[in-house]
Amino acid sequence: PPEDRDGRPPAEASGPPAHALLLGGFGRSRAPKVQPFLPAWLAEPSCVGKNVTKDLVPIEDIPEVHPDLQKKLRAHGISSYFPVQAAVIPALLESAANGFLVGRGGYRPSDLCVSAPTGSGKTLAFVIPVVQALLHRAVCQVRALVVLPTKELAQQVSKVFNIYTDATSLRVALVTGQKSLAKEQETLVQKTVDGFRCMADIVVATPGRLVDHIDQTPGFSLQHLRFLVIDEADRMIDSMHQSWLPRVVAAAFPSEGAKDPFALVQRRQPQTVTAASTCWPQMPLQKLLFSATLTQNPEKLQRLGLHQPRLFSTGLAQGGSRDADTEVDGDSGGKYTFPAGLTHHYVPCSLRSKPLAVLHLILEMSFSRVLCFTNSRENSHRLFLLVQAFGGVTVAEFSSRYGPGQRKTILKQFEQGKIQLLISTDATARGIDVQGVQLVVNYDAPQYLRTYVHRVGRTARAGKTGQAFTLLLKVQERRFLRMLAEGGVPELERHDIPGELLQPLVPQYEEALSQLERAIKEERKQKAA
Ligand SMILES: Nc1ncnc2c1ncn2[C@@H]1O[C@H](COP(=O)(O)OP(=O)(O)OP(=O)(O)O)[C@@H](O)[C@H]1O
């Protein structure tokens, strides 16, 4: 064997023979990093431009989009497509170009996964092609189903569908549990003398309520489903324990006995593509996944049963960017792309000075729309009571302690600028599109990178600028900054708030603290009563 530079034989040459069993050597040796192996479709995505202010494509440059929809886009102040829209809309339109039956060349179209930053316009990237594909349908059937994790998000997406289906014969139904089951049933099916009539072409739903309708709504059929859109897909994969997806697939491809005898083209569960299988045209079910933090974990994605998937991505880099050491929210870490107009800061704080830091940021920097995240309902409520007692700031809280109706009103008032500071749990962290949020404050540092991406993504949307401040205790700094650096956060500026700047707020703050204690005691008494 070759010798090393000092002329000594290599270590193993003097060691025991290769077949001998070695005991010991249990010292702390670091196991070599295992580089994840990504399937080609994940490792080589179709790249999408990240800058929504530069990589714009004028509406007239994508003539495939129906003139009526182009007109609607313009009427809503949209003159150009954002990069993700310019990439995904033509791809989706092409896959639906042969009507509902088959994709290009007679093949079943690829499922699509789309990973693009918060506020980059992913909603219209699926709304436009889905509406266009259904524009000339003859009979009303549920042909598109959009599943989202929260009521607020579902409502927001159904609103966008309503805009683009307005003045067409297409109908959109929202099923989130906000209305009674019976009321929702009326928007889905109508009883007729000889059976049921479908009342919705596009259903926007949260998973729990969707399963309720699959189970309990007579005549609710997904046998004509052509598009299944899974928005906030990484979060929806986490909710798969509710097994909503197998239920949807089972309803879309019913067993022999449950099939609609009048359906022109009978559907079968897709199997291996063979020459014989392609001879028999049948309507495909195409899955479309969207997220700002799409998982790159092939095992997780596999649970969705994707068919020859295609990935559109602004930033999930090739295998190397995944750090196998970083467990993020139960998912392998990845690098994410952030909106170009977002500036990230962190503020070193003590536990006691955190509320003062929030007040300082609002009062001194005079932001008019600030979204502040905490890690629990209790923390949100305490901070809300404290700021309210301090005075001088119009403040509200948003959490599951309020019903859907109240939450809707709160968001509306916040959007209208009637609320200066909205204190929220992660209930508003994802997807919520509130115009004009200038500042996001992480009062409690988020535990996971994905949470950080979505929270700070409530500002700097659609090419605008915005700021994100994260308050960090000394003990949190190292781990948090490392997590962000590994996650691809561009540059985190340290923002120190000197004690003398906070000092003038202290007397009023002390008074607010004692008011807070009284308010909490009072609430406890009322609860006990
Ligand atoms: N082409 C466009 N031109 C101008 N504004 C647009 C365009 N497309 C979308 N927008 C606006 O950008 C905002 C953000 O869009 P959207 O909510 O779809 O983002 P998103 O990518 O889904 O974000 P998130 O990941 O946070 O859910 C919306 O207010 C939308 O109206």
Image (cartoon, rainbow, N blue to C red):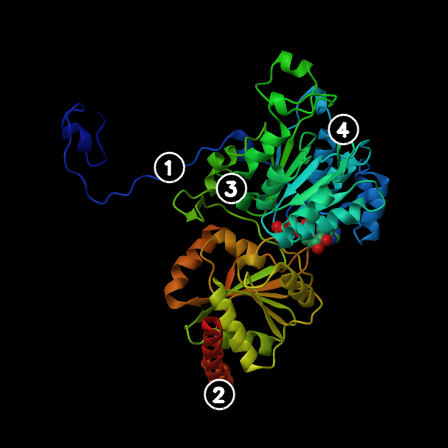
Nearer-the-camera pick, 31 or 131: 131
From the image, tell me which residue sits under label 4: 97
- Left-right relation of 85 to 426: right
Residue extending furthest front? Answer: 193
Disc 2 or 1, which lies upstream in sequence? 1
Label ID, residue 104:
none
Q: What is the x, y in percent for residue 232?
A: 58, 46
- Left-right relation of 103 to 242: right
Nearer-the-camera pick, 154 or 506: 154
Nearer-the-camera pick, 11 or 511: 511
Amino acid under disc 4: Ala
Question: Residue 417 lies in what quarter of the image?
Answer: bottom right
Element on which disc 3 rests: helix
For marks 4 and 1, give the one nearer the viewer: 4
Gap between marks 4 and 1, in whole Å? Answer: 43 Å
Q: Are marks 3 and 4 in contact (CB under 8 Å)?
A: no
Label ID, residue 34:
1
Decide: few, some or many residues near mark 2? Use Cα within 10 Å; few <14, some 14-19, many ≥20: few
From the image, tell me which residue sits under label 3: 242
Residue under the point 40% across and 42% down: 324
Q: What is the x, y in percent for residue 250?
A: 58, 30
Residue under the point 65% across and 47% down: 181
Disc 3 or 4, which lies upstream in sequence? 4
Amino acid under disc 2: Pro
Amino acid under disc 1: Val
Element on which disc 2 rests: helix
Gap between marks 2 and 1, in whole Å? Answer: 55 Å
Disc 3 or 1, which lies upstream in sequence? 1
Q: What is the x, y in percent for residue 300?
A: 48, 37
Element on which disc 4 rests: loop
For marks 2 and 1, give the one nearer the viewer: 2
Label ID, residue 507:
2
